[in-house]
Image: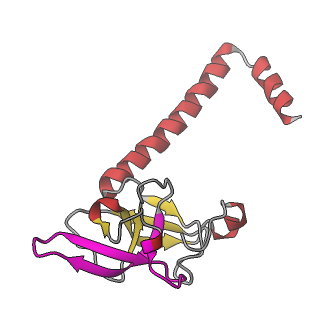
Amino acid sequence: MLSLDFLDDVRRMNKRQLYYQVLNFGMIVSSALMIWKGLMVITGSESPIVVVLSGSMEPAFHRGDLLFLTNRVEDPIRVGEIVVFRIEGREIPIVHRVLKIHEKQNGHIKFLTKGDNNAVDDRGLYKQGQHWLEKKDVVGRARGSSVLLRNTSPHLPQFPRCC
């Protein structure tokens, strides 16, 4: 009965101690949010750190690997680059490699992606009628990785290999 012991500890605290504990917790949460927002500004990505949730990019990345992203507007997207993108209608971003680039004469770039461990490209994952991704779909580009969470991957949500 851990929860009852916690409540007993809270009841034994005087008001000053309780206020101090709440203030400390608030400082920790606000510090974490400031660090996250700072990383967003520095990297230009809405999500500067993501966790790989499927095996579609093996052997490059495994489930549980952390990816560090940037998303600078001036950097062109290149074939072979690993991008994290979001598809309309899906909440979870996908980590895959750029397979082909289609550049129009006006300079507008569209690109096709594929998971390293997948047999086919990602056109089946895109929304119906969409055959290429655009820069607006990109959450970030992988600039580094860490295997910090790899050992906890059995506790990550299960997703099919295609995503």
Identify the residue at image location x=49%, y=78%: 115
Tell me: 13 left or right of 161: right
Residue drawn at the location 79% of the way across and 19% of the way down: 12
Q: Position of residue 140 (x, y in %)?
A: 37, 63
Occupied quadrant, residue 117: bottom right
Q: Quadrant of the C terminus?
A: bottom right
Q: Position of residue 69 (x, y in %)?
A: 39, 64
What colour scheme does the image use? secondary structure
Up-down relation of residue 137 to residue 29 (above or below): below
Q: How many marks?
A: 0
Q: Is residue 62 left or right of residue 154?
A: left
| Furthest residue toward left | 106
Looking at the rendering, in which quadrant would you find the N terminus?
top right
Residue 84 is covered by the magenta coloring: no
For this orientation, the residue located farthest to the front is: 129
156 relative position to 90: left or right: right
Judge by depth and name the residue closer to the eye, 37 or 84. Answer: 84
Q: From which residue to which does the magenta span run?
A: 94-123
